Image (spheres, coloured by chain):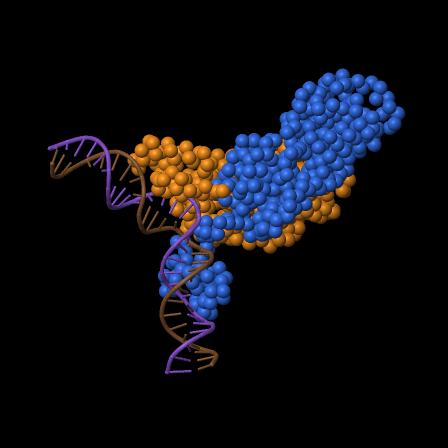
Chain colours: A orange, B blue, C brown, D purple
Amino acid sequence: MKENLSSIAARLGVSVTTVSRVLSGNAAKYRISEDTAKKVQEEAAKCNYAPSILAQSLRRQQTKTIGLLTPSLANPYFAEMASVIISEIHSRGYTTLVIDTMEDESNYKNGFNQMISRQVDGILAVPCGKDSTIPELVNQDYVPVILVDRYYEDSSLPYVTTNNYKGGYDATRLLIEAGHKRIACIQGVRSSTPNNERVRGYRDALAEANLSDFALIAGNEFSIQNGYLEMKLILSRPVRPSAVFALSNNISLGVLKAIKEASLRVPEHISLISFDNYSYMDYMEPPITRVSQPVEDMALLATKLLFARVEGISPGASQLRLSPTIIRGESVARLSPAVAGALRTDFQMDRETIQDPELQDIIS
Amino acid sequence: MKENLSSIAARLGVSVTTVSRVLSGNAAKYRISEDTAKKVQEEAAKCNYAPSILAQSLRRQQTKTIGLLTPSLANPYFAEMASVIISEIHSRGYTTLVIDTMEDESNYKNGFNQMISRQVDGILAVPCGKDSTIPELVNQDYVPVILVDRYYEDSSLPYVTTNNYKGGYDATRLLIEAGHKRIACIQGVRSSTPNNERVRGYRDALAEANLSDFALIAGNEFSIQNGYLEMKLILSRPVRPSAVFALSNNISLGVLKAIKEASLRVPEHISLISFDNYSYMDYMEPPITRVSQPVEDMALLATKLLFARVEGISPGASQLRLSPTIIRGESVARLSPAVAGALRTDFQMDRETIQDPELQDIIS
DNA sequence: TATATTTGCGCAATCGTTTGTGCTATTTTT
DNA sequence: AAAAATAGCACAAACGATTGCGCAAATATA
């Protein structure tokens, strides 16, 4: 059924070596006669021969396979990223081994071992958790690793990410310039660098505008539920923020659900700006104003960096941040200065609202 | 750097065979003494040994790898499907090789060859195009193939799909029962079975209600653009339908865009029902009424069927259709009988509007 | 014609496992 | 104490490719 070099060789009365040399394009190099070469090629074509990549890989110590560790394909952000990465890898003649870590750190760590066992030639990974030892070990001792989207603070592993600080800062500025003074922020996983950078941008923008007294940072997951629950809590406060900065697409969905359940409307009663872009956001009511990450560019660049190392033209470690852009929807209300001023006085939100010990130092 | 059986064997002064037998759990079967076994295990653990799956695969003729051919990970419908499939495969100790065919038939066909070259143990595929020869050949001569979502009319290849006929029928019924009499349908790829089944359901529902005279079927792609352009055309007609049945999530987005650009509103001016479910649809204005396909169940079942064959407990070919459910949003207006009647008289859309020759016989 | 060179190809080792078979040393049986 | 049984392990072939080296025949050189 499955042809191999020796079946062809036997039929032609030549050696396996000869067949191999012809079919791998080394006929000239090894002085195989044109006659023989032609014979072999024709036979191979006729019987529809395809080499066993397994055997090739074992021999060449090179699998032509890249490993992709993604936190959740069900999230359109990562799905889009994966889509671009997979196509890009494919266009270079490699295939992709995908593991969905489901945002679980032990899945993530095991993922690396599995990739090593399968001897991928390189790994693209979106980290889960803050422990960089395994990826670093893999990168040093085995194959190149490039991080995408998230990265480790204290590590020299190369990564490609959005300039999340800028995203956080710009989004908050946009709200401030629209006259908002009580701006809440609902964040995602606190061990993730993008999250923390966004929060930092948020805080700096507030500080710059002397609005730090009203900083309110809640939440701990990039999920719909987290957005929903935290927004419920926020809405039950005596004094509400006039705007919310949701640090991911899913968080925004949860926020919207909570707002809707409270019979409030965006942006009339409360403004919303979200991180992450997704085509559906244009069709929502209202269309969501959002910080769009350059997903495609990130994916392309990460793949490029990886192949540079896989194929040996190794540049030093690169840690790249690409600028996000803001897509303006209609979810941010422009407050008249009068209203904004008025609102400000009755707002007494204070530091105690931040209960996470880990966050205290970020906020402090 | 990378440990292997012989490096361990050398260090311990035993044979590669012995190490292999211990580490693959066959110590007892081959009467390796407990002492030796323990020694080997400890050494393996200490040096962090992981077997080369490549070598194992070559020897065992089994790669513990499943191939997944998906048309577009950028589409949330397929992304969700892939997510479930990949997790399920992972939970069985296999990994997944993913190829995004980008809705291109030649990518799709090449995909099979690549999968064969890499000797996957089985293939899950969402077909592109109507030519079933390659998948059938692969299924017969190489490894089990299970189709998901789409399938081939004339083939006995096993598949798992939605009962698309029922989906098309139910959606149309819902519109009819809401009083609509001029119902347009914007379809996707005409070579795809789900599409044609949906259209058949639509037509049968219309026929049953004596509304076939108003059948209007347009479009040819499961894309936003197709939905947009076709809806533009429909809106430029002298007599507009009162409701549109969009045969996919992306088509609906295009339809909404066209409607918005015409300064019309859903459902006040025109009703919409869509195929495919996606969480964002609940947050749109209005929330979209839609036919939800049991994506997760389909993915689970397809994986289950595949493994039954991969692991030898081969049941005969199964061709399964799972029932869709309707999720009610607020995008369908209930027309009062008077209005519905009134509208009917001024509607003169006829058969000539259907220009695709291929479709003539479906429609006829 | 004898020697040197080139042409054309095959041998055999190798990548890292798995596994049927067989060999020796120990233990059990009679 | 001799024969039989068993325990404990190693040899070597195989999976399907790649590649350094070498050998014989054909051709070129002297």
Residue B353 appears left or right of D25:
right
How many numbered tags mark residues here?
A: 0
Residue sitting nearer the eye, A241 or B179: B179
Q: Residue at x 75, y 32 (%)?
A: B201
Residue sitting nearer the eye, B300 or B257: B300
Q: Is residue A276 above or below residue B224?
A: below
Residue sitting nearer the eye, A127 or B59: B59
Q: Position of residue B159 (x, y in %)?
A: 64, 40
Q: Position of residue A145 (x, y in %)?
A: 46, 45
- Dividing the picture into quadrants, the one containing residue B335 is top right
Do we see residue B33 in this rendering?
A: yes
Q: Residue at x 47, y 65 (%)?
A: B30
Do we see residue A208 in this rendering?
A: no
Q: Position of residue B122 (x, y in %)?
A: 56, 45
Q: Residue at x 77, y 30 (%)?
A: B204
Q: Residue at x 43, y 36 (%)?
A: A44
Q: Position of residue B186 (x, y in %)?
A: 70, 27
